[in-house]
Amino acid sequence: MGRSSKDKRDIYYRLAKEEGWRARSAFKLLQLDEEFQLFEGVRRAVDLCAAPGSWSQVLSRKLKGGAGEGPESVKIVAVDLQAMAPLPGVVQIQGDITKVSTAQEIIQHFEGQPADLVVCDGAPDVTGLHDIDEYIQAQLLLAALNITTHVLNKGGTFVAKIFRGKDVTLLYSQLRIFFPDVTCAKPRSSRNSSIEAFVVCRGYCPPEGYVPNMSNPLLDHCYDVDFNQLEGPNRVIVPFLACGDLSAYDSDQTYPLQLAPGKEYSYVPPTQPPICPPYQEACFLKRNNLLAKEPGPAPLEEADPAPTYGSAPEPQGCPPEAAVENVLASLSVSP
Ligand SMILES: C[S@@+](CC[C@H](N)C(=O)[O-])C[C@H]1O[C@@H](n2cnc3c(N)ncnc32)[C@H](O)[C@@H]1O
């Protein structure tokens, strides 16, 4: 498969590289902003689950105006489990947002000066078992909401990825405890084939007397109640909005490489290759033919050359000797 093949199949992946975004997700936040004007009057923002950093890039460009300099009063804090390449003007924290210690670290950065906007594009590694994936995603959203209750200014906005599964009404009702205005939105750049959408929660207003607490049982509703079965005024219907300009590219379509007559296509590499990704060791083993093999009969013909990992961006950041030593250690081989 040529390296331009993904550029054909995924227009937003291609545009992200051409426009200098670290990930195609940047377009989701930009399209949500087109609909909801998320950045109006925002000086301080938190980007939860931020790696590789395209949402932080969007925040930086919108709040600081590009070069990451901008006014002193603008503050952007980005958090992720994974290490993230530095971004000018963005404070980075490596940690798990479901851990109290990470939440405390974020809160420290905002003491006395609450944030105006919290965004969370968090996604677990999906297992393919939909119930489990939806549950874990919901827990990630609740962890983000919990952190939000500590740092968000009254009237502020919270935007988070949600899986629109059968329990979406439960999450909606939990969010409505804190926000009078909650909409579930689907940007054009989010594939129709995916159950992913984003909740846009505006006008933060916690219940009277509510004291933020990282282990607050208020958020841990029981999953046995089927909110979809409620009748009359008790029935909850989650507002849904398809957003983004209707003339924008369709994320489920394949486009020709030449997008407009006279506009020649040229391949652009990813803006920021992953640093120390978990697959780095596997790539090394594969390239050096160090993967364990099943003993079997000798091949009758010459084997095909090992496939290359051409489409996986070349990782950066780990010294090659360290990777070799890790590999050799895991194989119990001395260098
Ligand atoms: C879809 S990516 C985010 C993309 C990002 N918004 C961007 O534009 O570059 C989802 C991220 O969620 C992070 N994540 C998942 N669970 C997490 C957790 N418990 N704490 C912190 N980050 C988490 C993953 O490490 C991953 O980087």
Image (cartoon, rainbow, N blue to C red):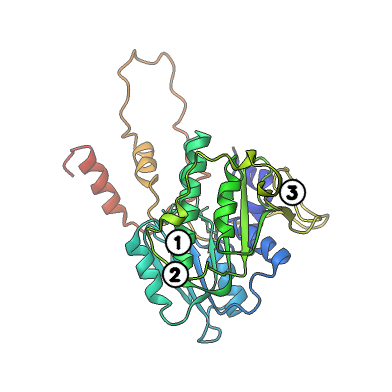
Q: In the rendered view, would you say 69 is above or below 185?
A: below
Q: Residues within 10 Å of mark 1 (few under 14, many from 20)?
A: many
In three-dimensional space, the C-alpha distance between marks 3 and 1, rounded to whole angstroms, equals 34 Å
Q: Name the residue beneath numbered marker 1.
A: 146
Say whether marks 2 and 3 touch (CB < 8 Å).
Answer: no
Q: Which residue corresponds to the image point at 36% horizontal and 60% vertical from the top-left?
A: 95
Q: Position of residue 47 (x, y in %)?
A: 50, 65
Front residue of 225 and 194? 225
Say whether marks 1 and 2 touch (CB < 8 Å).
Answer: yes
Mark 3 is on which residue type?
A: Asp
Can you name the residue that lies furthest to the bottom here? Answer: 72
Q: Quadrant of residue 246?
A: bottom right
Q: Position of residue 289 (x, y in %)?
A: 34, 34
- Please, what secondary structure does the residue beneath circle 1 have? helix
Does residue 124 appear in this view? yes
Q: Name the residue beneath numbered marker 2.
A: 150
Of pointers 3 and 1, the one earlier in the residue sequence:
1
Can you name the residue that lies furthest to the left here? Answer: 334
Q: Which residue corresponds to the image point at 41% horizontal and 13% vertical from the top-left?
A: 300
Mark 2 is on which residue type?
A: His
- Please, what secondary structure does the residue beneath circle 3 have? loop
Q: In the rendered view, would you say 294 is above or below 101?
A: above
Q: Name the residue beneath numbered marker 3.
A: 250
